[in-house]
Amino acid sequence: MPAYNEAERVGEAVRGARRHAPEVVVIDDGSTDDTAAEAERAGAVVLRHDRNRGKGAALQTGFRYAQEKGVECVIAMDADGQHDPEEIPLFLETYRRTGLPVLIGDRMTNVRGMPRVRRWTNRYMSRLLSRRIGQVIPDTQNGYRLYRCDSLPARPLGSARFAADSEILLEMAARGVRFGAVPTRVIYRDERSKINPIRDTVRFYRMLKQWRAL
């Protein structure tokens, strides 16, 4: 769980995940509130960044930890309550049944409750990225994912922030990794999203342009 200033929500997310996972790891990405303390109180292992480096950097820290521990697979999820921990068994069951090394949550089968702009953006970016990758991924912007550890990015990500979720898919697809999808709920609360629609869309296109040049 990458987390930045999520003291209000992270404890609930950790406790929910612990019901289905042997270990929960929170990457405190330079928070200035009590995120780390709340995560530890809820039973998580906490890895800390001394400053805010972005979601992509936090994911990489978590990936390294998992690989060093020698675990088979990891589930990445947000710490802000938008991902339902009760869906972790769906990822695990689908992984065991299909053997696919990467499973991506799919909110687009039931978009009730998703803000209209987010819905349009997700569909557009998912179609764009699916064409680039050569595989149909219904919800490429969903960070709720299962990764088999031997499929994780083989090189450092160029995107430190939210474009990292898309860059991970591009890097894996370039190595022939296959993806699957798991239907997940849409959970939006009244908190302000950390995604900046303009700035992060620009970062997405910049990252995509760099990959086209490779």
Image (cartoon, grey):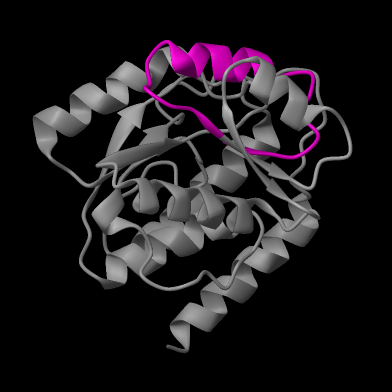
- In the figure, 34 relative to 174: above or below? above
Q: Is residue 8 part of the magenta span, yes or no? A: yes
Quadrant location of the C terminus in the rendered image: bottom left
- Identity of the residue drawn at 32% across and 29% down: 182
Residue 10 in view: no
- Quadrant assignment, res 86: top left
Residue 135 in picture, x, y percent from top left? 26, 57
Q: Is residue 106 visible?
A: yes
Choose between 25 and 180: the one closer to the eye.
25
Position of residue 170 measured from the top left corner of the image (x, y, whole percent): 39, 66
* 92 lies left or right of 33: left
For this rendering, which residue is in front, 178 or 201?
Answer: 178
The reply to whether the magenta stretch includes residue 9 is yes
Left or right: 115 as drawn, with respect to 15: right
Q: Which residues are magenta?
A: 1-25
Q: Relative to 54, is 45 above or below?
A: above
Residue in the picture at 49% in, 58% down: 166
Residue depicted at 81% across the width and 41% down the height: 31
Quarter of the view holding residue 119: top right
Which image quarter holds the N terminus? Answer: top right
